[in-house]
Image (tube, rainbow, N blue to C red):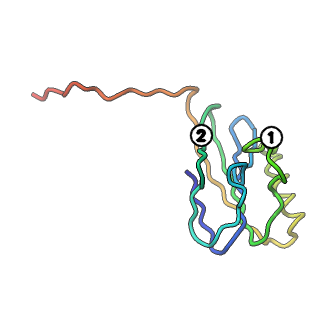
Amino acid sequence: TIYVTVSQASFIYVYDIQPDGLVRLIFPNAYSQSNFVSAGMHTLPDGLYKFTVAPPAGVEQLQIFASPSPLQLAPQSYGEPFPMIAGDPESATGQIQGHIMGITPEPLWATAWASFTIVGQGYGFTPPTTTPAILP
């Protein structure tokens, strides 16, 4: 779950920068294309879809942009639910910010970052034991 708080009505865009360098626009997306939100806290996903954390292992980052006017960062149509933007996180971030700066010469947008670490290559689960512990 992603929580986004904005101080005024804004268009928000969320990019996922994966440890392997893939960058995807995860909001807006094919399931939730309306990215204009009122002031306050909002929760994503905001529909019947889910975000899944999966390998590859490493640090994954989210970059969130908010602007009182649309930044034209979302595609006109969605060929896939969460469109891939670029393959290199360093250049992709610069391209995204450069694109925004070209659209809005004055800084009429804000950005925030969040990151988390994906550990391991698989998922494991150990069920709780059903035998009660014997205490001395």
The residue at the point 60 percent across, 34 percent down is 54
Figure check: 54 above or below 113? above
Indicate the position of residue 36 as horizontal and vertical percent values: 70, 66
Indicate the position of residue 62 as horizontal and vertical percent values: 66, 50
Q: Which amino acid does label 1 sit on?
A: Asp
Q: Is residue 48 left or right of residue 18?
A: left
Q: Which quadrant holds the C terminus? A: top left
Figure check: 82 above or below 128? below
Figure check: 107 above or below 100? below
Secondary structure at badge 2 equals loop
Q: In this view, does 122 lie to the left or right of 15?
A: left
Tell us which disc is closer to us: 2 or 1.
2
Q: Which amino acid does label 2 sit on?
A: Thr
Mark 2 and mark 1 residues within 8 Å of each other at the beta carbon = no
Q: Residue furthest left?
A: 136
| Residue hosting label 2 | 52
Q: Is residue 31 left or right of residue 105?
A: left
Answer with mark 2 or mark 1, whichever residue precedes in sequence: 2
Q: Quadrant of residue 97?
A: bottom right
Q: How crowded is mark 2: few (under 14 residues within 10 Å), some or many (20 or more)?
A: few
| Residue hosting label 1 | 88
Alpha carbons under labels 2 and 1: distance apart? 21 Å
